[in-house]
Every structure is written in C-alpha cells, then in structure tokens.
Amino acid sequence: MDKKYAYYKTKLGIIKISYQEKVESIELVDKIGFNNERSNLSDKIFYQIDMYLKREIKEFDIYGDLEITGTDFQKSVWQELINIPYGETRTYKEIAQKINNPKALRAVGTAIGKNPFFIIIPCHRVIRSDGKMGGFAYGLDVKEKLLDLEKSY
C-alpha cells in the first residue's frame, strides 16, 4: 500500500496527515501538495485536531490510529509528552527524570524534535528550566499560540 497524504487548513496553517493503514505523521506545512487523498481515517484525525483548536476537547482518543515508530528511548519520551496534562508545561529536565534518565537532557530535546505527530503528541508543552520557550519545529510563534490556547480554555 502506498503512503497517502491529506491536507487540512487551520488557523495555525496547513496540516498534512501522512497515512497508510494507520497515520504515520502529522505536520504543519507551507502548501497543499499535489496528492490530497482525504479518507475516513484522515478526517477522523483532523476532526479531533480541529475540535482541540476550537477548544472543544482537551484530550485525544485517537492514539490507536497512529503508527508510532521510533527508538525505545524516543517512544518513552513521546509517552511522557502525552502524559502532560492539558494547559500545563514540563521542562526537558522533568521529562528526563520521568523516563529515569536524568542526564539525558539533550537526548530528550532531540527526541522531542523528532516527534512525528504535531499537536497529538504535545511537544509544545515542553519548556526550558528557566521558563523560556526553548525550541519548536514549527517556530516559537506556533508554540506560543498553542500554549496560549490551552491557558485560556
């Protein structure tokens, strides 16, 4: 089965969902690609993202529809991100401690940067120990918008 792509416009920009049997990635992109093949699966995923962006839901129940691939370390970091409650933040240090690898701050940051599921695995909820934003794959303005959305709910 060939990989398919579905594109959806949001107030944050264009969300691209890549999928086969399950969703393989969700990312923010600059433009809608040539092959836009929406399906029941991609519509279901986008519906929850859209509900989140409209402040109608705080949690997702679509993790079983994701094909989460990565190293065991990456998966442990991503699972900790899922555990961060809506509207709260954690530091890279706190994530490293939660996965019982307190010295792995840089590795935690690298794993977070490779998160393939924009919004669904909430890497935007991770900040630096000094309270500053830290990095974000889609720019600090998008990270700030997501954090503000959750704070104002």
Image (cartoon, grey):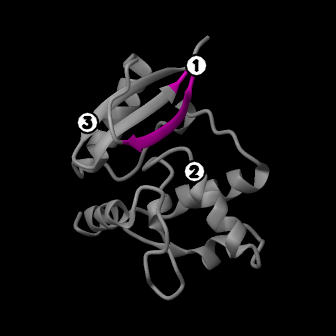
Helix, strand or loop at label 1? It is loop
Tell which circle, 3 or 1, labels the residue nearer the N-terminal end: 3
**Residue at label 3?**
9
The residue positioned 53% from the left and 39% from the top of the image is: 63
Q: Is residue 94 placed above or below 73 in the rendered structure?
A: below
Magenta residue span: 19-29
Residue drawn where x is 45% and y is 84% of the image: 131
Q: Classify 10 Å Cα crowding around label 1: few (below 14), some (14-19), many (20 and above).
A: few
Upstream in sequence: badge 2 or badge 3: 3
Q: List the residue tagged with mark 2.
A: 115
Q: Which label lies toward us, 3 or 1? A: 3
Confirm whether the magenta stretch covers residue 123: no
For this view, does 47 lie left or right of residue 82?
left
Relative to 47, does residue 123 appear above or below in the rendering?
below
Residue 105 in picture, x, y percent from top left: 69, 75
Whole-percent x and y of residue 137?
A: 48, 57
Q: Main secondary structure of the magenta part?
A: strand
Q: Quadrant of the N terminus?
A: top right
Amino acid type, callout 1 = Glu
What's the distance in space between the residues labelled 2 and 1, CA to CA? 19 Å
Q: Secondary structure at mark 3?
A: strand
At 47% from the left and 39% from the top, the residue drawn is 26
At which x and y percent is residue 118? Answer: 46, 48
Kindly identify which residue carries mark 1: 21
Nearer-N-terminus badge (2/1): 1
**Which residue occupies the foreground of this view, 123 or 114?**
114
Task: Determine whether, in the image, residue 32 is placed left or right of residue 61.
Answer: left
Return the mark for residue 73: none
User: Looking at this rendering, what residue extends furthest in the bottom direction?
Assistant: 130
